[in-house]
Image (cartoon, rainbow, N blue to C red):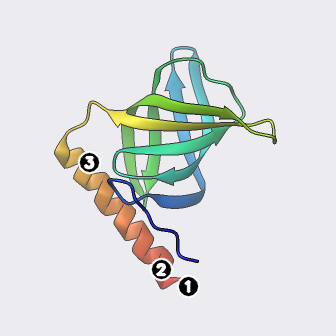
């Protein structure tokens, strides 16, 4: 069965990609689940209660720093927490750079199958 991606931007599933979440109380490490040019989702061992954070991550060996607004939070059966965020305060050039890195990473994944 083929899943259709109905989002505004292509969303790439990532495994074992780190994201650093910088927040008013400090910083925490988490794992990216998927990413698009406009946001990402991640799992963490910590429950974040703030509205936004700065995220540090890389895609296809290109480093990114984005301010992100939390749009969804769920506790998981594993005891971890799932978060979805939307990137805010970035320009079209920055969006294009991230989109290109995502598409290059997808091309690499398809080439390895």
Q: Residues within 10 Å of mark 2 (few under 14, many from 20)?
A: few
Task: Check the picture and name the quadrant holding the C terminus.
Answer: bottom right
Mark 1 and mark 2 in contact? Answer it, CB < 8 Å: yes
- When the figure is inspected, residue 51 is found, relative to residue 76, above or below; the finding is above
Q: Secondary structure at mark 1?
A: loop
Where is residue 97? Give x, y as percent.
Answer: 26, 54
Dot 3 or dot 2, earlier in sequence: 3
Where is residue 5? Give x, y as percent.
Answer: 43, 63
Where is residue 40? Give x, y as percent.
Answer: 47, 45
Mark 3 and mark 2 in contact? Answer it, CB < 8 Å: no
**Label 3, on which residue?**
95
**Label 2, on which residue?**
110
**Label 1, on which residue?**
113
- Badge number at residue 77: none
Identity of the residue drawn at 48% across and 29% down:
70
Quadrant housing residue 46: top right
Task: Check the picture and name the quadrant holding the N terminus.
Answer: bottom right
Quadrant housing residue 89: top left
């Amino acid at each position: 069965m083929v899943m259709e991606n109905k989002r505004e931007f292509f969303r790439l599933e990532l495994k074992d990609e780190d994201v650093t979440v910088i927040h008013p109380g400090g910083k925490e490490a988490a794992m990216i689940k998927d990413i698009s040019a406009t946001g990402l989702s991640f799992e963490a061992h910590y429950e974040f209660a703030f509205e936004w954070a700065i995220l540090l991550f890389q895609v296809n060996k290109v480093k990114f720093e984005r301010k992100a607004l939390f749009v969804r939070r769920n506790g998981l059966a594993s005891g971890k927490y799932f978060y979805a965020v939307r990137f805010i305060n970035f320009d079209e050039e920055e969006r294009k750079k991230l989109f290109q890195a995502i598409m290059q990473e997808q091309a690499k994944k398809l080439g390895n199958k």
